[in-house]
Amino acid sequence: MKLKNEEKIKIIKLSNEGYSIKDLCEMYNVSKTTIATIRSLYKIHKYDFLSKNKKNNYSFNFKIWIIKLVKTGRSIHDIAVKFNINSGVIYSWIKKYLNLDYNGLKRKIGRPCKMNLNKKLKEKETTTDKDKKIKELEERNAQLEMENDLLKKLRALVQQRKEQQKKKK
């Protein structure tokens, strides 16, 4: 559940009045981590953390610097609180860094591609599935043709024996 700024202010005030984290969790139906994060953000940034822009565009160098801080062993939670960044954003930067190195952190220039990457992957999967199915059907067809040839030869042998038996009689 996402908390509104008014609720966060109330949590801060109640926390300052002496309410425990457990009490606040029950009152607002949120996790202990959420309450602890709000308290930590308030201690460092006071009420400034509430006026954070929704869509921040962080520079390439800033992202690299944050990742280097994580590499030094600092907690992602601590870094997120200190710089007032959502920890999920930092996790996504780390994931991009691990998968694509520094190139994954660069902002893509230009209009985004119309075709989604997932659609491309699904199309590749369907074409490979179709190719597999075609190969299986070709193998099955070859097997059935061999069986058919075998049955024809068997029929011919049976007819030969019948003719030989008729000639003997």
Image (cartoon, helix red, strand yellow):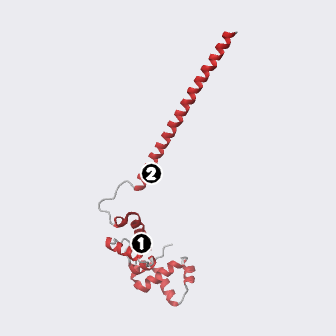
Question: Real-space Cα distance between discs 1 and 2?
Answer: 28 Å
Q: Earlier in the sequence, mark 1 or mark 2?
A: 1
Which element is circle 1 on? Answer: helix
For this view, does 143 lie left or right of residue 164? left
**Category of crowding for the residue at label 1, using alpha-carbon neighbours closer than 10 angstroms: few (below 14), some (14–19), many (at least 20):** some
Q: Say if 142 sits above or below 62 in the image.
A: above
Quick one: 35 or 124, which is closer to the camera?
A: 124
Percent x, y for residue 169? 70, 9
Q: Going by the picture, which residue comes out furthest to the front?
A: 168
**As drawn, 143 above or below 161:** below
> Could you tell me which residue is drawn at 29 percent across and 62 percent down?
109
Look at 68% across and 13% down and name the residue there: 165
Q: Residues within 10 Å of mark 2 (few under 14, many from 20)?
A: few
Q: Position of residue 133 (x, y in %)?
A: 50, 42
Q: Please name whichever residue, 4 or 71, is drawn nearer the observer in this view of the structure.
A: 71
Q: Position of residue 135 (x, y in %)?
A: 49, 40
Which disc is residue 120 wearing? none
| Quarter of the image where one finds residue 168 | top right
Farthest residue, direction bottom: 17
**At x 47% / y 81%, what residue is drawn?**
38
Which one is in front, 130 or 138? 138
> What number is the disc on residue 122?
2
Residue receiving disc 1? 90
Amino acid at dot 2: Lys
**As shown in the figure, which amino acid type bears the numbered disc 1?**
Ile
Query: Where, by quadrant of the figure, is residue 167 drawn?
Result: top right
